[in-house]
Amino acid sequence: MMTLKVNGRDHQVDAEADTPLLYVLRNDLALNAAKFGCGLGQCGSCTVIVDGKAVLSCVTPLVLVEGKQVTTLEGLGTVATPAPIQRAFMEEQAAQCGYCIAGMMMRAQALLMRNPKPSDAQIRAELEPNLCRCGTHMRILRAVHRAARLMDTADAASDRSIR
Amino acid sequence: MTAPVVLDRRSVLAGGGALIVSFSLRGAIAQEQKPQSPALPGSLAKSPNLDSWIRIDANGQVTAFTGKAELGQGFRTAFQQIAAEQLDIPFDALKVITADTKLTANEGYTSGSHSMQDSGTAILHAAAQARALLVAEAARRFDLPPDGLRTENAAVIAPDGRRLGYGELVASDMLHVQAQPTSSLKDPAGFKVMGQPVPRVDIPAKVTGGAAYVQDMRLPGMVHARVVRPPSYGAQFVECDTAAIEKMPGVIQIVRDGNFLAVVAEKEFSAVKAMHALAAAAKWRESAKLPNQHDLANVLTALPSQDFAILQRSDPTVSGARSLEATYTRPYQSHGSIGPSCAVAQFIDGAMTVWTHTQGVYPDRQAIAEMLGMAPASVRLIHVEGSGCYGHNGADDAAADAALIARALPGRPVRVQWMREQEHGWEPYGPAMVTKLSASLTADGKIADWNFAVWSNTHSMRPGGAGALLAAQHMARSFAVPAPKPLPLPEGGGDRNAIPIYNFPNAHVMHHFIPAMPLRISAMRALGAYHNVFSTESFMDELAALAGADPVEFRLRHLDDQRGRAVVVKAAEEFGWTRGQQPPRNRGYGFAFARYKNLAAYCAIASEVEVDRETGRARLVRAVAAVDAGQVVNPDGITNQIEGAIVQSTSWTLYESVTFDETRITSIDWQTYPILRFNAVPDSIAVHIINRPGQPFLGSGETGQGPAAASLANAIAHATGKRLRDLPLSRKRIKDAIDA
Amino acid sequence: MTGQLRIITGIAAIVLVAGAAAALAVAWRPQIAAIAPPRADTFDPDLVKRGRELAAIGNCNTCHTVQAGATYAGGLPVPTPFGIVFSSNITPDADTGIGGWPEEAFVRAMRSGVARDGQHLYPTFPYDHFTNVSDADDRALYAFLMTRQPVHASPPANQLSFPLNYRLLIAGWKLLYLRSGDALQDSAKGAEWNRGAYLVEGLAHCGACHTPRNALGAERVNAQFSGGEVDNWHAYALNDTSHAPVRWTADALYAYLRHGWQADHGTARGPMAEVVGNLATVPDGDVRAIAVYMADISGALAPDRKRPADVVAQSSSDDAAQTHAAGAAIYAAACASCHEGRRALPYGGVNLALSTAIASPDPRNLLNIVLSGVGAIEGERSPIMPGFAASIDDTQMVALTAYLRERFGKRPAWANLDKAERDARAVQATSLAARDTPAESRQRGKP
């Protein structure tokens, strides 16, 4: 048993220390957003935020995240009350199959927390580890720009504090 | 529920004709219906009952059904728009149920950009005819002629203001009738929902962590399985000491059946660890002899082929003087779904249920039933979205894996998740292809004579029979891989788009169909059209250069199809294409056009690329596309499809090839099968849609693949002065061409 | 000696030497008149082709190109202990590149580090190696560079403090350290060895990274190939002080330089990845020659380094898991699946018992690689290793690397590992921050 801090809550998890965070999020905590894409740290589908930074949860064993704050896409907002990044992806219709999108959003979120006004080149550089196969890239870029603008408004300020 | 329908609807159905009331048991499943009239539009031809498509409950809930599988193209939203429009129901009030062998019609596979043509058309007409039936029933109750009634917000309204909701009007079997060949469709000019960029209904869940995929399923008591595939095609299981693995924590069972090997565990990571242990312990005898991947052109053309002359057009009065010939090649390429295939299966009381992201619930059910020796009626396949598949990936195989394992653990839902290496190593690839072209030009710069020959495998080894499934091939009672067949024209497979759309006076097209399949192959987005359009449209540019003509003008010179001309002109205009325009240094402009399958959507793409002469790196800078997909239902959906097609085709065209050694596939992850990443994404993509209100839906999912590839190749040729004919147009090939 | 003191001493020495040099009037070099840039088609294509191969051996593109910038257009900031020097534009642009340079000016720059206008060039341009490049090869290089596309681009001004911003001082440096141009040759050795010597000591300038430098930034001739510095990476010793767990043979070196990886040693990364990327395009014979010469200079081997790879691969310290339980747990969970997987190099992780990074007395390379991983190369088959900077904190990182050192390195613990870890992370963070800055100012090869 170990304690995992996910989306602001403590969870008691019965899993081996070498279990990748991804499996624990998906199976033990029933969180859908982080996806299994390669299990090798090559595609970014499993990206979540740990202590404010984008992390590939498929190659991050529990032993590394004990005591740290894990945030998944579920922790940002809901359909009814979406976070700016979620609103932006909805407004830009930035998905086809959508399988990569949660990972894209978490990496973009980590960027925007660090750099609230990234340039287009910076967004591209940041998203480099994440693969999309449908070719939704143009929309993803637009959505991240839109999220930056949305976050810039005062009412969204609280979302920046998400860790 | 199955009582005969008493209403006389003869007089109210637009288009007239006999009203045939079906008495078939609804529970006996819609796909059993026999088509009564070949003239019925779209998939109504195969599943003519209106209630196969539209259901209205007494509480007013309206549901549209499709036998097609949402693969991320967004057509669930488009279908909802169609039904809402034709039924005059608020968009949000409508539900759409997708492919499920218990609930929906048998629409075969979701492929070939057919969803809008087949299913969209069926729903369009079914919804319109359902509306007519509702109006007729209201007319009867109001005792008014139907002509004066109107529909609005899920109700029929009389001129005097009386109003009857659909739920009140619907009789038990009102829609359990056969469709008519024609419908009273709404005037496109008055559309409120169709033609609008309605936001996709699936996106909110996908951006908030809602359950959206088969991978997200968590059934009570569900266990996790992993398969251990043989190391190479045809490898035979020799032995495996499983004693230690069976004792690993959480391991429930090791399932072996011939060459099929899998492990089931309570927790997913336990299954993964056990899978690794099992893979390390298993001994195999390998025998595969794969061809030389660096010599595919000769490998393919040397294989025995069945040869079909698919076009022989002759006009002896026209002959050419200057001539040109060229050979183009395409390697095996991967679908490369971001999420490896996954399925959940449960075997209870002799009935098997499989949740799968297959593209064809009915054919896959047939195959799985055959594999398990079960009656198809005892097997239910339910489509649940997976990661985008772009054709026949591992989905059907994962479904078979899950079913085979679940049968060994009755009662427990079994979730099988393929690993990355398994998806890349075992998916059926897009086949390698070779095309040889020659043509001659008349004195006035027109193509006099066009010869096109294509060598290719089939482009569909989809299930139907169990032998198409890996699990069935590997189990002890092994099913043989079915004999491949060329896909029939006019759509074709390896010869898809091999016949030119242009008006060449002499044209000869040969399809060399190769039955032998050195690598496992099947359908990949656009099938042969990707390479055939790449070849045709590259060669058109080569001939334009020989003729000293502008590439766009040269195409128009040979193109009679007015809708085709319109997209060519539109793309050129929006791109700012002008004859002889000088690009900035190291940049080039390219153009390409095709009508997918010569019968579906039209697409023209103009591209600007930048080539680094020192590294050979080519980057698509911008692309401008014009597309005519017939009547537009959701313009943003079409734009999304075309944008995606351009980016994906750019990745195929610049980077991708399956690699293998003498025995094994070696491109088994993103290190060894690199695809486009963000630093290669263009600066801009613009998609211009030419809407054709009232015209048939043509589908847009695959029309962009070929033109995007050729447009890119032509732009690279323009930028470098070098023509590359072997896919992919890799950095090394470009650099070698520049340095040559 | 602290770094600062060393610099001050260095400056003082240079000032003194420069004064003397000036007195002797050796510093002055004449300007060579500019020419109209020759047309590309005036050069023999075979000469251009040879020049392309030589430029790859010389790794010219690495320093003369900024990330995502035009190749050979310069502007790359090269950090030195004395400040930042920006690489020059060596495309044939008449105004900002070498378009106006006649061949004799190019040869003079290669031989004596003097620009066409007579200015001394800072020795970040490794002309101390290029002195031995033959006339024929210089001609080929010139032909190659003059047939590149001219790019109009001026590098930023160097950021050197007084008095080092005076180029005249370089003349003094040259007086001390610039050797005559004769290539090292030994008739007792074979042609391959001699070819290798010519390339390694000359155009390939291997010592520029792999030889330590003195206070004045010159390579220490008496410590040649005993390990140096580049871009916050440690360039391993290539001589008999090498810490590679398995001895380098000529065949192994050849495979490594040719393909970027070798089964007994691992995969090239950091700045070396760029070198092997270039060597992949040069004639086979030249790579083999470099390998033969390098294997020879690696000299006598300590007995424990002669064991074959399979023995080394199996050996490990059993005590490590006890003494470094936390690190062992991290290794088992985060590293072992790839580094003990069944996949062969280069796409599988190397058995860490074979890792020079872990055996090396300098932990930086190991820290760099674990923090940053190995990124994908656009559209190219290439190894990918995820970086762990975001998921492994300082304490975990120290625990992990200390464990790896004991278990696989079987060598004494690294001193000051905590500080090295923080430094490496600071560099990594700078690199990450650099992504948030415009591309032009980005440095190359930063971990």
Image (spheres, helix red, strand yellow):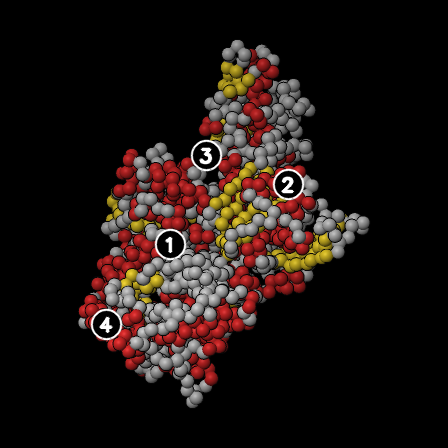
Q: Amino acid at mark 1?
A: Ala
Give the quadrant of residue C121: bottom left
Q: Nearer the viewer, mark 1 or mark 4?
A: 4
Q: Can you identify the residue that label 2 sits on?
A: B564
- Same-chain check, marks 3 and 1: no
Q: Tell me the SS state at disc 3.
A: loop
What amino acid does circle 3 point to? Pro
Numbered label attached to residue C439: 1
Q: Amino acid at mark 4?
A: Val
Distance from the alpha carbon under mark 4 to that under mark 3: 72 Å
B672 up-or-down from C237: above or below: above
Pointer 4 local density, CA inside 10 Å: few below 14, some 14–19, many at least 20 = some
Question: Residue A98: where, in percent of width, then height?
Answer: 44, 43
Give the mark, 2 or 3, whose residue is nearer the N terminus.
3
Q: Nearer the viewer, mark 2 or mark 3?
A: 2
Image quadrant where one finds the C terminus of chain B:
bottom right
Cα gap from disc 1 to disc 4, whole angstroms:
36 Å
- How far apart marks 2 and 3 lie (CA) works out to 29 Å
Where is mark 4, residue-wise? C15
What's the residue at 24%, 64% (across, down)?
A: C162
Give the camera-side residue of B624 and B40: B624
Residue plotted at (72% across, 55% down): B440
Q: How far is the residue under mark 4 from the one under mark 2? A: 76 Å
Find the distance from the CA under tag 3 to the CA under tag 1. Answer: 36 Å
**Place of residue B166 in the rendered image (x, y in percent of width and height, measured from the top left):** 51, 21
Asked if residue B598 is positioned above or below residue A41 in the image, the reply reads above
| Residue B259 visible to an observer of this rendering | no
Q: Residues within 10 Å of mark 1 (few under 14, many from 20)?
A: some
Circle 1 SS class:
helix
Q: Which residue is the site of mark 3?
A: B199
